[in-house]
Amino acid sequence: MPTDSLDLLTRYVGGEAPTLNRLGGADWAKTKGRARKAVKEIAGELIRLYSVRMATRGHAFGPDSPWQRELEDAFPYTETPDQMAAIDEVKHDMEQQVPMDRVICGDVGYGKTEIALRAAFKAVQDGKQVAVLVPTTLLAQQHFATFSERMAQFPVTVRSLSRFDSPKQTEATLEGLVAGTVDIVIGTHRLLQPTTRFKDLGLVVVDEEQRFGVEHKEYLKQLRTSVDVLTMSATPIPRTLEMSLTGIREMSTILTPPEERHPVLTFVGGYDEKQVAAAIRRELLREGQVFYVHNRVDSIDRAAARLRELVPEARVAVGHGQMNEDLLEHIMVGFWEKEFDVLVCTTIVESGLDIANANTLVVERADAFGLSQMHQLRGRVGRARERAYAYFLYPPERPLTETAHDRLATLAQNTDLGAGMQVAMKDLEIRGAGNLLGGEQSGHIAGVGFDLYVRLVGEAVAEFRGEQPAEEVADVKVDLPVDAHLPHGYIPGERLRLEAYRALAAATDDAAVEAVRAELLDRYGPMPQPVSNLLEVARFRAFARRYGVTEVSLQGSVVRFSPVTLRESQEMRMHRLHPRSVWKGTISTISVPRPRSPMPGSGAGPGDPLRDVPLLEWARGVLVDVLGERPASAAAPVPSAAAAG
């Protein structure tokens, strides 16, 4: 691909095996057309939802109360800058008339709960009720403890609603919600049952959003038109990611890890008993605890027995979702209070649990887990100052499927703090984005690739909002002997070089080229000749664009300019100033013989054909001689944008 049209190049993210089309054939245009049509329908539906939300009068919450500040000052840690920004964005959204619909994407353990807690408290200050929806009983329990502790000195009633509560407690909580005596309720799917009624619901917080199914979300969507919704997730499921990427929901990202957090050292490999035993012993030596994930309830006790044999000195407990509530609660509290060293459990621990002393995670049969699941599991460790270890093991005797291999590879590559966003992006790649609103979209993403798809959605959404699409700029092809490129020595790394080429290709006027030049100087230092030449080519393209010329190329010994239409007087001037030039009216092209030096200062030997910057200068001269001066604003009109692609 010529470097000057690199801005057309995007990386394909979509299905496993994309279909390739012949260049110049009609297949690609058809595929794109189909995707565009499907995207139009979706965009229409999205805009409908969005405009319903925008037109709804929600509750505009008041500014922060003194109590609010008191609660916030009691936060035992220092907020990270991103966390502060996200909190401010959420509060700002709540103070608007329009109902909030914001996604907070922050990695595991980055303090999303604190944002929810402050938003909930703010809502309660205005006499509204808050529902916090969490995927697992354990997490409900933990949030309940956190919220109760932080709000203890304020007149706020916090209740939980999960299967850890007795029927009597549950009934009392439900009655309290209807009567309005319960301010904040933290619960699992129980909250989504039609029997749960609120007196005056003002805010819904969805934690670990990737764990809820479409129908749960549909139910929430009915609430959503009039209630503020705050969604939190470390690995936002592709659909949410896609909606926030296309600007339908607002998104805040928390990227800075809390102080003194280290990335989790991740090991992916075949299962080996000796290694497992060594990992557990190493954790016991520093008096830490271990999560051992075995996701089969029927064989979990056998797995625990095997660990007891391997590491007899460890106190092993078993926890899974099918146990009796009291027993499970007893075991979890026991683990919390360091009565056990190793917890053999199912993915019941996956979401949001915060046990600072557990810093080793061993996952059996990691090939059977989904990507965001594994990322979540890994987030259970490394929440304190200690260095944490995660082992994702698979049976060495069985071959991995391709997707399992991809997932494990992604996990091993994205180990740094805050990898959730990359993991979600990769997940998009491995499984496509799912429909923004339902199931039938993924095919089109595979067809045109995710980048282009998102661009199409963006265009369609803008069109529905009545925004004028940006006028497409004509592409100018310059094919002249100019030594113009970015040398490897000047800009190291493929990605950075591509980025620079793209920036240049997208620069359509002198000011934009100048901005790129300033940035290159700033980032990479003085420019070698080929880079200066490349900038000159970009400037020349902007210049040719003023004349509506889309191609300047060397063919044999003549330079061709097209399309050019000449009046008779201009044709005569061309023959006078550039003898032996030819204008072909039928194909709107002028052909001018390529000059030879010596031209002073060109650096070419006598009689050599002109090249590099002097040739560009000469070509500029030809356009000015024949067609006259054109000011920068006189860009020629462009043929229809629909043809561009």
Image (cartoon, rainbow, N blue to C red):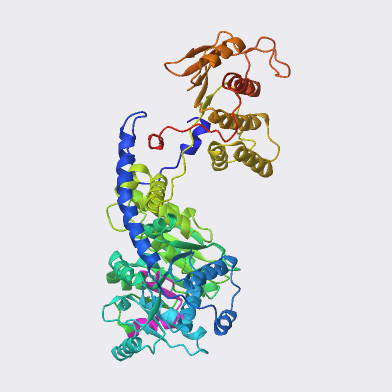
Res. 233 visible in picture: no
From the top left corner, tell me how far across and down residue 355 is, in percent.
48, 75
From the top left corner, tell me how far across and down residue 18 is, in percent.
34, 40
Front residue (pair 546, 24): 546
Q: In this view, does 206 lie to the left or right of 539?
A: left
Q: Tell me what residue is drawn at x 70 percent, y 40 percent.
A: 525
Q: In this view, does 211 lie to the left or right of 540?
A: left
Which quadrant of the rendered structure holds the C terminus?
Answer: top left
The number of callouts visible is 0
- Tell me which segment is drawn in magenta: 326-352
From the top left corner, tell me how far across and down residue 388 is, in percent.
52, 66
Residue 271 versus residue 447 in the image, above or below:
below
Res. 571 visible in picture: yes
From the top left corner, tell me how far across and down residue 52 is, in percent.
35, 64
Quarter occupied by residue 228: bottom left
Whether the magenta-drawn stretch holds residue 315 is answered as no
Residue 278 versus residue 397 in the image, above or below:
below
Residue situated furthest top in the rendering: 580
Front residue (pair 207, 201): 201
Residue 203 versus residue 584 in the image, above or below:
below
Front residue (pair 493, 195): 195
